Image (cartoon, grey):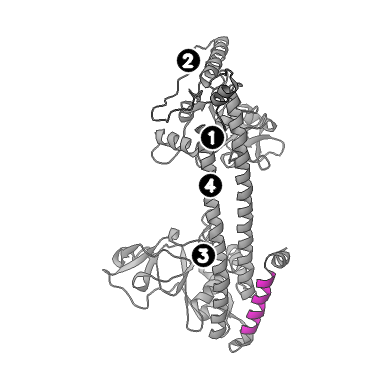
Amino acid sequence: MTNELRVQEEPAVYKVLLDRIASVRESGRDRNSGALIPLPEVAELNPRRFSNQPLDTDLVSFVPMRAVEEESGSIDSTSLRPWSEVKKGYTAFQNGDVIVAKITPCMENGKFALASALHGGRAAGSTEFHVLRAKPELLPKYLLHFIFTPAVRRAAKMNMKGAAGQLRVPIQFFEGLRIPVPALDAQREIVAYLDEQLSRLDASVAALHRVQANLKRYRASVLKSACEGRLVPTEAELARQEGRDFETGGRLLLRILAERRERMSALSKQKEAVSAVTSGFAELPEGWSWASVEQINLAARPCAYGVLQPGNDQPEGVQLVRVGDVNDGRIDIEDLKRIDPEIAAAYPRTKLSGGEVLITLVGAIGRTAVVPTALAGANTARAVGVIPLSPHISAHWVEHWFRNPSTLDRMVAASHEVARKTLNLEDVRLAAVALPPLAEQHRIVAEADRRLSLIRVADAQVAANLARAQRLRQSILQAAFTMPAQAGQ
């Protein structure tokens, strides 16, 4: 598969690189004929002192883990602290050192960098860094590129130790690591060629990330326009043009409330639905009305909050929708967990029948989706809110309304949670929803879905290109170190 990718995606680059590497290796056979050298012979591991020790009052760069960019080898060294504050409890390093994240997932994500532009040439950083200081016969940038190679990263991952979530690469891994060390001139040529190829690749990746950001903004713009009545002609405008009457959102709400009262009466319940609080909202388009979620909720089945925990997977059990299964207006049906039917049956309020709107309340808050009929009989896990709706309103319209970023911003601002951003069921039950005429709801949803599907296709293409760029990066780096990197040999 790897060879196929190389042939299909970068035949010219890969062939030229291999030819160049072969030629520079031929010129670099003055050190053990290019044999693999134990890393401790050519680099200090976690050195304890600077070359030039600072005074307590000297400022040094402060580099927490977040200051190291993934995959690029870049460091933000602009934060400064007095040496007296950071000389204990942090990892010290200096210009020219290679720092390597040792903890998961930072190591797997490629938080490695060559320290440069440090204040006074010195820094203190996260204790989750290993420091590799190249000796005179090894170029620091060559060492960094070597650490980035797929073979080294795979070996490092295989050698991680510790508890789940706290796995770390031990220093013993680097003590046993071997590296090909050609002559310095050969190293310089390899580094120059890698820098040239990878800088072009980085520029392409940056452009793809800009496209992703633009698509995200466009997605938000589509949803905002939909929720403000600017995506399709309003029912009021069409009715005037066609010389006819139409059912306004206000009349639709009265019809829903009348049916709700009848159902409540049949259930011997008299509680009236709470109206929406709409102060601070912009004026609605002609023919629209405000409603609270409770007003458009099925009277016989109020909003509910999932409380089930996934537990062990039961192959023949009841499907369970978790927070991570809800995203971008959809539910990932393929990977749903299944739970014991008897446990699921104990929570009938969150049993799904199809047509409900789901909203995530904790963690990745505000993700929404309409439950497809294929999930009838499924249940919801903890932190997934269920909104059963009147059959006289489009569930997809309500889902689009809640997916609109400005709607979520209002709900979070109204939440009483302080320690972290969450929603609770009361936030959802009392939330205001704009109610266009039903025919207009369907038109808005159709046009919004058309545009969002185009965005989804473009997003997938960008993601595929980013994945290809990552594979190309790995094959370029691996080509530069064709002798396999091995630990402990």
Foreground mark, 4 or 3, reads: 4
In this picture, residue 131 sits left or right of residue 336:
left
Q: Give the range drawn in magenta.
A: 11-24
Which circle marks residue 216 in the picture?
Answer: 4
Q: Classify 10 Å Cα crowding around label 2: few (below 14), some (14-19), many (20 and above).
A: few
Dot 2 corresponds to which residue? Answer: 272
Gap between marks 3 and 1 measured at Cα: 39 Å
- Which of the 4 image quarters holds residue 195? bottom right
The reply to whether dot 4 and dot 1 touch (C-beta < 8 Å) is no
Q: Nearer the viewer, mark 3 or mark 1?
A: 1
Name the residue that disc number 1 marks. Answer: 226
Q: Where is residue 106 in the image (x, y as percent from the top left)?
A: 51, 59
Residue 72 badge = 3
Front: mark 4 or 1: 1
Q: Nearer the viewer, mark 4 or mark 2?
A: 4
**Mark 2: amino acid:** Glu
Does label 3 or label 1 sit earlier along the sequence? 3
Disc 3 residue type?
Answer: Ser
Q: Which label's residue is closer to the chain start, 4 or 2?
A: 4
- How busy is the neighbourhood of tag 4: few (under 14 within 10 Å), some, or many (20 plus)? some
**Vertical comparison of 313 with 304: above or below:** below
Marks 1 and 2 sit apart, C-alpha to C-alpha, by: 30 Å
